Amino acid sequence: MLDFDPSADIQALRSTFADIKAVVDVEALTADIARLSEEAGAPDLWDDVEKAQKVTSALSHRQAELKRVTDVEQRLDDLDVLVELANEMDDEDSAEEARREIAELEDIVSQLEVQTLLDGEYDDRSAVVTIRSGAGGDDATDFAEMLMRMYLRWAERHKYPVKVMDTSYAEGAGIKSATFQVDAPYAYGTLSVEAGTHRLARISPFGSADKRQTSFAAVEVIPVMEEAVEVDVPESDIRVDVFRSSGPGGQSVNTTDSAVRITHLPTGIVVSMQNEKSQIQNRAAAMRVLQTRLMLLQREEEAAKKKELAGVITASWGDQMRSYFLYGQQLVKDLRTGHEVGNPAVVFDGDLDGFISAGIRWRKRKDDDD
């Protein structure tokens, strides 16, 4: 007789899921989808292309959010049937299938639970991620490219659309920098815990002495704004350079000088765009990113000033936040949360959910303590 009683596990799943549904507010989400669907169905929607894109993007995000919740609800109902079938038929295969489904649902519900912690002003937005190589020569530029692939693979695992906006290739290995957009609900809130300095320690494949090499790369994450943020950027404060887009080895991608680089002179912030077909589009995209970065910088400075006035001066939580060890003890360790994985290969292949979940929970605790 099959002794299979996962009722406690299923009850725990249902209890956690009920809390998630209460936070998500399915009724409000459904009403929002109905409103956006009506707007998207307007015959004159595409008379204003920018507005149309905002409406359709918002609708897609909310539909995806609702689908994640309704899919879990349906799978929990199906799980009850599967368990009942396994016990009635004394079927070990069905019981094993139910065990696998419980494990998968526990993972999904845990991710949804983490998402409920994303309650920041811009957490529900898509994200623009910029990776820059730091100290370490060819190892650093190679490391920057490894990080870019890691995040692109993470997005691919979750079926999140990604648009590479700019890539600056190094003369040797890897990239000097890259900027890409991840278009998904809560992409900013999720990926923002990846911002900071990443450190790689390994035996360099570029040296001849078989010495351990330490290299660094910086990751920046900003939200995608639906419209230009209210940050005044005088023309006198920027320098605009136009150049031809290029790929590895200097091979030309575009036949015209359509790529744009904007330098904000007072802060030294540089934004490059080469994904769009025209110079005008690239400049507009670069200005949106620049304005967002300036807005976030202003808020960070205001927050730092408040802490200083309060007598609390601490280093940014994002500085040197994770180390990747590819020699001796193979390990990836987050220095903030203590979360670690002993197989760097799977991490570089996009298996980041454990680090991201731990980072979000850590940040929430830190915010509550502050």
Image (tube, rainbow, N blue to C red):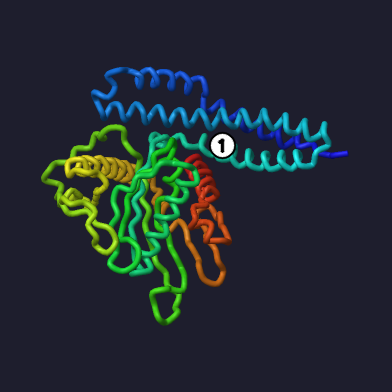
Q: Nearer the viewer, residue 208 or 21?
A: 208
Left-right relation of 353 to 10: left
The residue at 53%/28% (across/down) is: 23
- The percent position of residue 84, horizontal first and vertical second, equals 77, 30
The quarter of the displayed image where residue 217 is located: bottom left
The residue to which callout 1 is attached is 113
Question: Eyeballing the image, is 299 above or below 80?
Answer: below
* Residue 314 appears in the rendering: no
- The percent position of residue 340, horizontal first and vertical second, equals 56, 57
Question: Eyeballing the image, is 25 above or below 339?
Answer: above
Quadrant occupied by the N terminus: top right
The residue at 48%/45% (across/down) is: 363
Identify residue type, mark 1: Glu
Q: Tag 1's secondary structure?
A: helix
The residue at 72%/29% (across/down) is: 81
- The percent position of residue 97, horizontal first and vertical second, equals 71, 41
- The percent position of residue 137, horizontal first and vertical second, equals 33, 69
